[in-house]
Image (spheres, grey):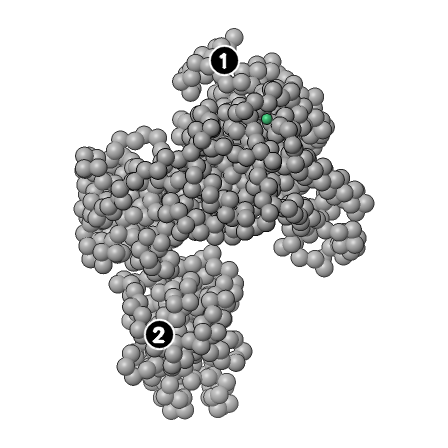
Amino acid sequence: MDPQDLLDLLDDQQARRLRVIENLLRGRKTVSTLYWGQRYDLLYLLSLDKHLARGGLDTVAQTLVSQKMATWLPAEQPQLRLTALGRKQRDQAVTFRPKTQALWPQITLGLARQRLLLSVQVVSQYAHQTARYYPLTTDLATRQAVRQWFHQVKSPELATQVFTALTASLTRLPPMTAQVVTAGFSGYQQPGLTVQQLAQDLQRTPWEVYLRHVDGVVQIAQDARQTDHPLHALLAPAWQTAVTRSAQATLRAVATTDLTLDQVAVQRHIKPSTVREHLLEAAIMLPVTAVPYDRLLPPATRQALLAVLPAQLDDWEYTALPVALQQRFDFFTFRLLAILCDKEGDHHAGTPDD
Amino acid sequence: MPEPLTTSLQAVFGYSQFRAGQEAALTALEAGQDTLAVLPTGAGKTLIYQLYGYRHAGCVLIVSPLLALMTDQVNRMHLAGFRRVAAITSLTSFGERQMILAHLAQYQFLFLSPEMLAQPAMLARLRQLPLSLLVIDEAHCIVQWGPDFRPEYLLLGAIRERLGSPLTLMLTATADQATKGEIAKQLRTTPTEVTASLDRPNIFLDVEPVANDAAKRERLLTLVTQLVFPGVIYFSSKQLATDTAQWLRDQTGLPVAAYHAGLSSEDRFKIQQQFMQGDLAIICATSAFGMGIDKNDVRYVIHYHLPADLGSYAQEMGRAGRDGQPSLAVLLYAPGDERLPLTLNQANRPDDATIQRFYAHPQAFSVDDPGIALLTFYQQHGISATAVQALFERRERERGRALAQMLAYVREPQCLRARWLTTFDEVAPAHTATCCAPGKVALDLDALGLKRQPVSAPTPVAPSWQAQLRRLLIADAPR
Ligand SMILES: [Zn+2]
């Protein structure tokens, strides 16, 4: 990531923890990372760079600070805030905004990407009747899924169907994004260009090129949700896992029975704290309607807490609550209320003009 | 009576003739003799065990230290028409490993990394398999101390016995007498030796001393500007390979890419295929580049850093000129270049005090450190601190000796080819004008016919993405 890419992830009103951004990119789905990811409106970064090393953004952050674009805030975890100069720089740059960004936390990107790339290669070689070629290196599960899919859909029309479907998806995106996605495909007489090479050709940062690539993959996967799409059987499974299976089971148990959270823990053979983590994860990742807020946060609870909490959501601190309230309501309840308020758009932090 | 070897060769690969060494190795194996084949890069070593596996029931078990490249190898076997092939390494996912283990008996070729083979559970499973052949690839790793050294190779002798001492093929591109003896000793066998000449007469050898790093960079640029494509430049670090690729691209406008183990497998695939297809003029590589590349028309290989030994050097520069056409191997040398391989030699080697402290309190150390990981391995296999010290000292002496041979090549005043080949106990042909240019002799690219003719290539117009997608997926699209 180049400094200008990180600049785009920071704010002048809201100090942001570099570790949260790093953990989002690395796909570390702890409740704390997810919560702050939501607060920063950066959940779309989730699992985008699984190979990023711990501390992998430190150098880039230091560069921004030394350029006086951002300042460190001394805190338990280092936080970054844009300076006026940084804000100006950020607003002046024509930054790329992925069109499908809101969908990114909902998709298992690695799965969708690998399946799409391998299936395009297979169809391309099939269309040109090449029997022997080097397949892209993928894991066994991807190879099996693509092989199975291919045997089911193989027909003389397949290549044209895939071409039509991909063209329709890519037409919905900016031409440069369509170009990035197409040039990155491997297939007949086309090894495909790497992100670095495309960045060089297009005079963009590798990060932006990568975001464009992801935008294209997600757009294609989104269109493939239609059952008559040629890649439907292959890509639809990428949408099933926004929340872990285990968290889904917990949510189901809470939403469909009258058991207390501790009873759910016993029934599911998991720790009571895990039940609460599952619910917070689901609350962050799923729409408001998916979580039984009325049961978990009765009106009296909301009123009691909201009466003493600051207007700015980012200023909420559990340990700053009066001791009596801390004894009545656990951290889970406090955090769940914060998630609900965020989702309902109350108490939204940030600048008036964004 | 099985069919003649040439009949099998024709049936499987469609060739009518073996290359040097292949038939001799197969004949020895067919006679039930363990075989050590020392064949140069590009001699088609894999064909030996592929054909043997084709001719005999049971499983061919291949032990190879090159983890990342094993998948490549499996792909290439698939490509060659072998279906029942699998690889298990530490990079294999748990699910995939379970899947392979569940169908173990069905595989005709099984690639295993040494550390996988050393696991008792794995060994127990393999003991139940009917093995037709055990292949030790890169067998020189048994004695080589370097970044790719795997301590598990030291267990191979014992493992081989546990497997019932199956017929064994040892493969390497490089081994002097001492190394060959050590391989045989470690594997507890007296193999038939099959060798082919290492010499590559069509590769002109050149050593160029330069004053310092800046001069080296300038010389590289001059060479790259003048030489015909395609070429490979080897570096000892990923960073320098990456930076130089960028610099050369900026300076020359040529399509140049970097290739190293730090790239994602997707990027490695793309760069490799671009190079194979002729989209790239130059690859700036680390030693990770090579095995997966079957490119015959590489015209030159330049070494920007000093390789750690002559064997590795021969293997890397040997990637030039597989088509038999005139090619060039350049070694750039600045005073002090030998410090880098020396440091690399010692980098992972724990000193005596560390060894003592480790053996006293193993728990106090982190296995993240490669040196400590090595010590942990030795300790777990019951090797004493004193024995480990002796082992390290011996390896360091061997590395020192190998580096001295490398430097002797660099400083050779008369004939580089003679220096190289005699190091490997081979008699060199007489020096001629098309043989080599030692340090004090200037390189004449015109005479070699390797000078690039200036061509004004039209700038290719990038097709629209729609046209590109159409070409990719529709067979009769305009090309
Ligand atoms: Zn000579």
> Percent from the top left, x then y, of residue B398?
72, 37
Quarter of the image where ligand 1 sits: top right
> Where on the picture, by quarter, is residue B362?
bottom right
* Residue B5 numbered tag: 1
Queried on whether the Cβ of the residue with tag 1 lies below 8 angstroms from ligand 1, the answer reads no
Q: Are marks 1 and 2 in contact (CB under 8 Å)?
A: no
The residue under label 2 is: A89
- SS class, disc 2: helix
| Relative height, residue A39 to residue B293 (above, below) | below
- For the image shown, how many numbered marks are present on the structure? 2
Query: Which chain is home to disc 2?
Result: A
Does any portion of residue B106 appear in the rendered image? no
The amino acid type, in three-letter code, at marker 1 is Leu
Chain where mark 1 sits: B
At label 2, the amino acid type is Gln
Local crowd at mark 2 within 10 Å, few (<14), some, or many (≥20)?
some
Q: Dot 1, crowdedness within 10 Å: few (<14), some or many (≥20)?
A: some
Q: Nearer the viewer, residue A229 or A85?
A: A85
Most distant residue in the top direction:
B1
Foreground of the two, A299 or B209: B209
Between marks 1 and 2 in the image, the one whose residue lies nearer the viewer: 2
Disc 1 secondary structure class: helix
**Residue B436 has which mark?**
none
Residue A56 at x, y percent in the picture: 50, 63
